[in-house]
Image (cartoon, grey):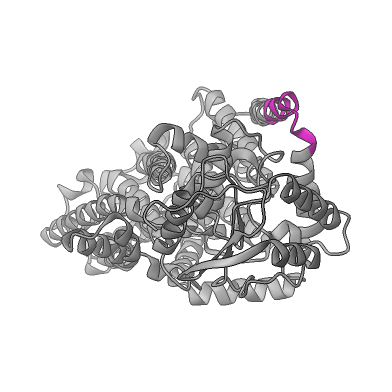
Amino acid sequence: MDASIGPGPTAAAVAPSSVVRSPISSRRTMSSSPPRFARASLLQGVVVLGVLLLVVAWAGATLQFPFGIDNGIHAYQGWVLRAGGRPYVDVFDSRGPFVMYGYGLAQALFGQNTWGVRLLDLAVLALGVVPLARAVAALEGRIAGVFCGVLAALWWASSSPGSLAQPDGWAGMLFAGALAPLLRRRTAGDPPMRRWLALAGGVIGLCTFSKPFYAALIVPVLVAIGSDRARDHKARLSDLMAVALAGLGVGVAVLGVMWLAGVLRAFVEAYLVFNVKVYAGEAQAGWGPRVGSLLRYVGSDPTIGYGIVLAGAGAWIGSRDPHADVRRATHVGIAWTLCTIGFVLLQGRFWRQHWLPTIPPLALLTTLGVSGLRRRLAVGERARAGAGGIAALLPLVLALALLVVAARTPAIYTLRGARALRDGATREALWDYHTGYRQGSASSFRAEHEAARYIAARTSAQDGVLVWGYAASVPYLAQRRIPGRFIYPYPLLAGAGTSLQPRFRAEFLHALGQRPPCYVVFDVGDPVVRAVAVPQFPTFDAWLRANYREEVRIERFALLRAATAGCHVLQHPAS
């Protein structure tokens, strides 16, 4: 096949019979295909439609999903911000403000609940998947674009409830939506894509305020600019400046807002100093062990495992494709994939949410690989048999198998939700149908709801509650503030030997003295907590024993009530 064949200007000079423009199938090729290809394409259309319906059903099931650990933390943070609190000063987090305000926005739009942020999460998913599918469709045909979008959505839907609605996934999908227009066909004389480049730079700047290393997402943008055939060297430098200025503009704007709000110093301490001195230091040491853990994780998670294998094959096929635009998109996808896997290695923890940014580039490379393989086999069979042989069906079978395998976990979630609705389950019981996927949980999310309801019934809106463990959903659902800003204990327990831990502990104890909570909730089901005691923090442990008594156990939660004066506790009306 001539190396010049492709969607560019030279494609018109090539005989139509020697080019298969759509990799998986399209209307353009279906009409002239042999009967078996037409039947296969019809089967493919039916499967894709069925999977699309599954994605829609899964999207409805996500509204029943319980909060994971981080979901509860971010929900409480968003509630505090909506109540007039300030990030980092009134509520601590080692992540950027991006996710706090995202949860606050969901609560402002949909109210204080557990499903509003799931709607926002679905919107972010659409913002990434739809532009990516459109870009692939422009390169390889409509069905290929649908396949790429559906595959990415299914891989996303295979994640546990607690790993969704997180800053990692949001950053990955927003960047996918910004990068996708840069993947489209580019020929000499095409106008510059300044607005899309500025959008990509702005999104990178925004993502950097989720986690600092997301600034490296500029690498796939550089690859897209450098391989743009429609631009000369001077124009490419101008394009790069557009990306850089947009990213820096967003960064300066965010820092300026924080400075005006009086939280810049606290932000730098939590987002940069704490992460460098404490969080990074407690990650898995050494690149060798990290790579080993990465390989073990890939082997244990079939979604990630076969995604990386197929994307690797797709990268090899796509980089040798005769179409220059496909090669360009493949090179961008390779750089994008390497960046996102690098982010996982940098964090050194290999949690499921850390993998979510890898999904869009893996889906892109997989689709380009299947498309290129079909094109090669179809052209080869036509050259030998004159009508296209059975070997060209192999990529189609592979594509359908991919969709079926990827649909397994979303189908489980959807069927569980449907069964719950069929059984007439209450809102709280609905959560139980999904909590089997919460690794390490001693009980269902319903326990958090019951603990919150118990506390809300026995306290006033002015009373506080302290959570020791990772159950921030309790104060969020009870609508009760914690004393101070530490909604989870990690900053108080980690960082021994640094100047941060003693300062954070002193601040925490001062807040307890200024506003003692009516209830202290111990999450004894959490492996970090385990018992109603804090031997790692002797001063707090002694204060707790002197002033609080255990009142009740609600599954994994031990609720301690103040035994001394200084905290008004209402009598339960039904007791």
Instruction: For residue 184, say whether it is visible.
Output: no
Quarter in which the N terminus is drawn: bottom left
Quarter of image, res 532? bottom right
**Would residue 272 be seen by someone viewing this image from the given angle?**
yes
Q: In front: 421, or 402? A: 421
- Identity of the residue furthest to the left in this view: 35
User: Residue at 22% of width from left, 52% of height from top?
Assistant: 53
For image coordinates 79% across by 68% down, the residue present is 538
Q: Nearer the viewer, residue 538 or 326?
A: 538
Q: Main secondary structure of the magenta part?
A: helix
Q: Position of residue 498 (x, y in %)?
A: 87, 59
Residue 77 found in image quarter: top right
When the figure is inspected, residue 436 is found, relative to residue 325, above or below; the finding is: below
For the record, the magenta segment spans 251-265
At x 39%, y 62%, the residue is 446
Is residue 253 covered in magenta? yes
- Rendered position, 547 above or below 227: below
Return the residue nearer the eye: 500 or 353: 500
Is 557 above or below relative to 367? Answer: below
Horizontal side of 473 relative to 136 (left or right) equals right
Left or right, residue 425 beside residue 276: left
x and y percentages locating residue 456 in the rendered image: 46, 49
Q: Quadrant of the C terminus?
A: bottom left
Residue 397, percent across and down? 27, 67
281 left or right of 393 in image: right
x, y percent for residue 12: 34, 36
- Membership of 177 in magenta stretch: no
| Number of marks in picture | 0
Q: Which is more toward the observer, 95 or 217?
A: 95
